[in-house]
Image: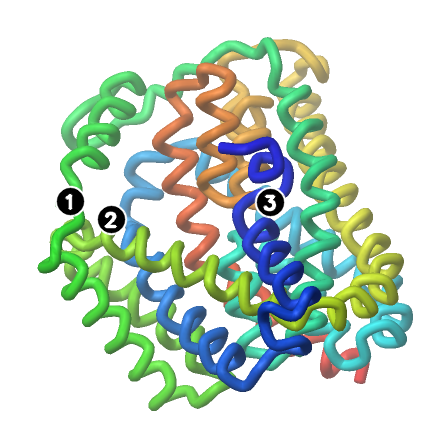
Amino acid sequence: KTFIGRLFGPPVTAMAIAFILGSIGILNPGGSPGAKVVQLLSIQLATPLLLLGVNIRECRQRCGPLLAAFILAAISTIIACLTAFPFCANSLHKALGADGLKIAAALMAKNIGGGLNYVAVCQSLNASPNAVAAGLCVDNIFALIYFPLTSALAAGRPDISDNIKTQSDHSPDMLVKGKAKEIESRTPINPETISAALTVGALATWLGETLGGQAGALPISTTLTILFTVICPRISKCISLSGEILGTSLLYLFFATAGAPGLSIADSVRSAFLPLGVFLSLLYGVHGAILFLVRSIVLLARGKKVGENADDEGAVLPQRLLVASSAAIGGPATACALAKANNWNSLVAPSLIVGNLGYAIATFAGIAFHTYFSKVIP
């Protein structure tokens, strides 16, 4: 609600507050063993809690061309990272050591899903707290460039008509209203839903640790939670709001503990700023270039000029590409905010759904990226 909060976003703001408190001695300088335990528990429990609101079935039924646009955006991020990392591998290794590849993998996951996936990959790969904080700080600087640019490209474009058919309705307006009613009808927070959400989250966390150990705990708990939402959609819907509030609070707690070491983080940010900046420049640049290139190719194949406004462009319509890109780079909240700011009412609900899909797949993509390059570039 404040200027600083809007500028930096909640995660970086939480980290900055803890950074200041650690630097002036109110918190233990350099962090503490207790903070590390809190950091581990917070992300392990936050992951299944936040995923309770994911409904994979809705993606196919409700999103139509926006789902294809989001898949294109996610693939663009993957190609961008595969292209960027070989150029930055040596400089990232010099600045961060073995954490260089881990942070690159986490940044790829973040720019497919969101902050949840960034910390999940960092935790799964055992990245150091200083490297985690450095990657997040530099990425947020680039986000301050990306989101205003996206808003500028979206300005003045009209709402679209998706003509998506579902089992119960056929018009986009009815789709949005139906989704709004679903959100409003979610069971409000009460002791029962809080207890149920914590039970599911704790069980998924325990099974993840038991079956996968430290490295596989988050991927396994992610998989189990998604299966739970598919098998028991009514139960997951009832407790999703409580899970969202609890999970978000725990996620901010993780970012706060990441900033707790104080000034010891500053050296990591300074040394890693240039290599991470080059990596992210290539990531964002190639991501956008692929989206523009695919749109151009599709329009030319259909015999249309680039820049020509058409209602039948499908997944490559600028409004859909901008929302899909925002969902991948910033997550469902930023995609929804972009749609609302431009009065694209037909894209508000689908943007939340595809953004949640990014949460579901990004952690696995980031870990696969790390596995591949750890073999290719020892």
Image check: 323 left or right of 240?
A: right
Q: CA distance from mark 2 to mark 1?
A: 7 Å
| Residue annotated with mark 1 | 188
Find residue 9 and report its horizontal and vertical position in percent: 57, 43
Above or below, comparing residue 51 to residue 160 in the picture: below
Residue 58 appearing in the image: yes
Amino acid type, mark 2: Leu
Residue 369 appearing in the image: no
Q: CA distance from mark 1 to mark 3?
A: 30 Å
The answer to whether the residues at label 2 and label 3 have Cβ atoms under 8 Å apart is no
Image check: 85 left or right of 294?
A: right
Q: Residue furthest left?
A: 192
Name which quarter of the figure residue 2 lies in. top right
Above or below, comparing residue 317 to residue 289 in the picture: above
- The disc label shown at residue 329, or none: 3
- 10 Å crowding of disc 3: few (<14), some (14-19), many (20+): many
The answer to whether the residues at label 2 and label 1 have Cβ atoms under 8 Å apart is yes
- Depth order, front residue of 205/12: 12
Image check: 21 left or right of 166?
A: right
Amino acid type, mark 3: Ile
Find residue 40 and report its horizontal and vertical position in percent: 47, 77
